[in-house]
Image (spheres, rainbow, N blue to C red):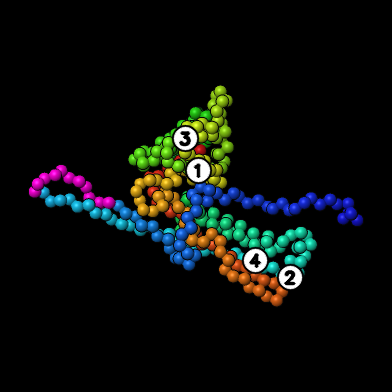
Amino acid sequence: PVQFLQTWLPGFVRTLTAARTIDELFGIATVGSFDDEQIVQGVLEYTGRAVPYGDHTNIPLASYETGYETRTVVRFEHGMGVGVLEQSRAARQKIDLASERRAGAALALEIERNKVGFYGYNSGGATYGALNEPNLPAYVNVAPGAGGTTWASKTFLEITADIRAILGDLVVSSGGNIKLDKTPITLGVALNAHTYLSVTNTLGSQSVAAWLAETYPTVRVVAVPEFDNANGGASVMYAFAETVEDGSSDDRRTIAQLVPSKFQTLGIEQGAKRYVEDFMNATAGIIVKRPYAIRRRSGI
């Protein structure tokens, strides 16, 4: 019989899912509660201006105006059930059935949260993602190189020129409040373009990644699968200041991922022969608080 002629390799290989980069790219702000309907961010703008002095003129008075940005919370649930017989048989296969199913439920919830973080959720409310948030600035196409516009066809000098252009645009759009030598900056690059950061100069002495680390040490790079072909088939790149020291009373983030509940156990139902567990999460997607502190490029 063949079972006497088999050697079993240890463990199990789990199937792969795409990398979830929303937390690495934007961080996670745990705010509110899972039963909230909306997350609200107040915005304050000063009004009035100074005028030339005169002994008999009216005093110009400073004031302010307020606005409120709201984001709608969406909730997802996923559960697992375990029967007595199947758990016993799984144990004979050296599988902890309950742990594996619980991990599968948690993974499914994380996949949905990551998806909302990039694409939003159309539930009739205001739940947006990093690719469709209404406060995002418009895309700007990268300059064409000698061989084309994509990084796959560009040289070291042409790729570094694209990076310099987006970082320079970030400084100008902020009125100088973002400083390339001091402000922490994230450069989110499409996964299918990220590999071209390894392109070297004509001497072969320096790659684009090495040049970036040496020239702009405050910039970190994140490879983002969702940025592949994101703008009408063109891959994209984002550059944004992680925080801006502008005297505001909020957390000073440029972009925030609003997550009231990352993972929560709702309850356990115990039956005679099996038990069921249910889990949930809650997210309000992405809010762009400082549109001037983010720039977008298309066609890399």
Q: Secondary structure at mark 4?
A: strand
Q: CA distance from mark 3 to mark 1?
A: 15 Å
Cβ atoms at labels 1 and 4 below 8 Å apart:
no
Q: Would you place residue 69 above or below residue 274 in this image?
A: above
Q: CA distance from mark 2 to mark 4?
A: 14 Å
For badge 4, the amino acid type reads Met
Per the image, the residue denoted by label 3 is 216
> Residue 270 placed where, x, y %?
66, 74
For badge 3, the amino acid type reads Tyr
The nearer-to-camera label among 3 and 4 is 3
The numbered dot on residue 84 is: 2
Residue 140 lies in what quarter of the image? top left
- The structure residue drawn at horizontal position 68% and vertical position 64%, both measured from the top left corner, is 98
> Residue 14 placed where, x, y %?
69, 53
Q: Nearer the viewer, residue 61 or 77?
A: 61
- The structure residue drawn at horizontal position 41% and vertical position 36%, both measured from the top left corner, is 168
What is the magenta range?
A: 46-56
Per the image, the residue denoted by label 4 is 80
Q: CA distance from mark 3 to mark 4?
A: 47 Å
